[in-house]
Image: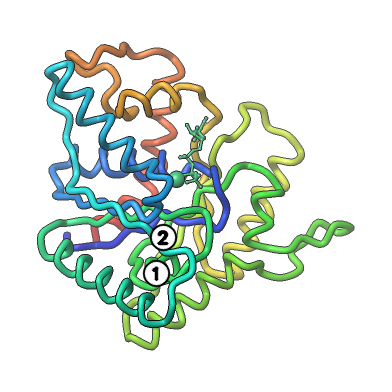
Amino acid sequence: MPKGKIIVIGNEKGGTGKSTLAMHLIAWLLHQKKTVASIDLDGRQGTLTHYIQNRADYAELHHVALELPVHLSVTVRANPDPQQRKEDEDAFIKQLDKLQKENDVIIIDTPGADSYLFRLAHVVADVLITPLNDSLIDLDVLAQIEPETLTIKSPAHYAQTVWQARQQRASQKKPQTRWFVLRNRMMHVSTRNEKLIWKLLEALGKRINFTALSGLGERVVFRELFLKGLTLLDVGKPKVGISMSMPHIAARQELRAILQAIGEDISS
Ligand SMILES: Nc1ncnc2c1ncn2[C@@H]1O[C@H](COP(=O)(O)OP(=O)(O)OP(=O)(O)O)[C@@H](O)[C@H]1O
Ligand SMILES: [Mg+2]
C-alpha cells in the first residue's frame, strides 16, 4: 500500500452515519496492522474525537488492548476573512503532508455542512465515502428527482461540490477520487421505496461516477458501541465484555461486505 492514502467520509447532510463509519474503518485498518491517522473536521461537535476518547478510556478501565489511531481535531471557523481562510487551508495541508509521511492511511471525518475546509478535504480525497440514510429526503443532496416519472432531473448541491473538487484535482494532475455512496440504516424488509432508491442510486452513479453500495441495516447496537468506544470488530474479543449476539453477527457481515467492496481501492 502506498503511504498516506486519504479517505474522506463526507455528505452535505447531517446524521447519516459518517462518524460511525469513520470509526469502523479506522478500527478495521488498525486491525490489519496499518498505521492510521484520523482527522475530525467536525471539531465543534467532536463525535469522532469523543468516540476515540471513549475507546481510550474503555481500554484503560477494562485493561484491554484496543488499537488507537493518531488523532487530530480541527475546528472550522464560521466566518473567516480571506487571510484566516488561507492560513487555515495552508495549516491543514501542512498537517496532512506530515501525517501522510508517517501513516499508511488518513481518515477524515467531515461535518454535514459545507465550509472551506470541507471543500479542501474533498479535493485531497483519494477515496470518498458518502453514507446516506435510506430515504428519498437524503437522496435530495445528490439529485433532484422528477416527482411524476421518478427519474433524475439533475445532480444536486453535494454532487456539484464533489464535481468541483474533482475538477480541482484534475487541474493538479491527481487521479480522480474514487467515490462510493453507501446506503445506511437500511430497513430489513424490502419495500417499493427501497427498490426505487436503489434504482435511482445506480442510475445516478453511472451519470456522476460513483459506485453505489448496499450498507448497514438499522441497528441499535451502534449506540451502545459509541459510549464504550467499541466497534463491531471488537465485539466478542476476550476482556472486551460484550458477547456476540445475532444483531452483531448480521451487522458484521454487512460491514465486511462494505469493506470488501472498497478494500481494494483502499489498499491499492
Ligand atoms: N446503521 C445504523 N443503525 C442504527 N443507528 C445508526 C446507524 N448508523 C448510525 N447510527 C446512529 O445514527 C446517529 C448518527 O450517526 P453519526 O453520528 O455516525 O452520523 P454523522 O453523519 O456523523 O452525523 P453528523 O452529521 O451530525 O456528524 C448516531 O446516533 C448513530 O449511533
Ligand atoms: Mg459526525
Q: Horizontal placement of 78 versus 32: left or right?
A: right
Q: Horizontal placement of 115 versus 267: left or right?
A: right
The x and y percentages for residue 3 are 15, 63
The x and y percentages for residue 96 are 22, 66
Circles 1 and 2: CB distance less than 8 Å? yes
Q: Quadrant of the N terminus?
A: bottom left
In which quarter of the view is residue 9 placed?
Answer: bottom left
The residue drawn where x is 26% and y is 12% is: 241
The residue drawn where x is 41% and y is 21% is: 224
The x and y percentages for residue 62 are 17, 16
Q: Horizontal placement of 137 versus 111: left or right?
A: right
Question: Is any atom of residue 2 visible in this view?
Answer: no
Q: Amino acid at mark 1?
A: Thr
Q: Amino acid at mark 2?
A: Leu
Which residue is label 1 attached to? Answer: 177
Mark 1 vs ligand 1: CB below 8 Å = no
Question: Is any atom of residue 12 visible in this view?
Answer: yes
Nearest the viewer among 173 and 94 is 94
The residue drawn where x is 17% and y is 64% is: 100
The residue drawn where x is 13% and y is 43% is: 33
Mark 2 vs ligand 1: CB below 8 Å = no
Q: Is residue 87 above or below residue 145?
A: below
Q: Quadrant of the C terminus?
A: bottom left
User: Which badge, 1 or 2, comes first in the chain's sequence?
Assistant: 2
Which residue is label 2 attached to? Answer: 128
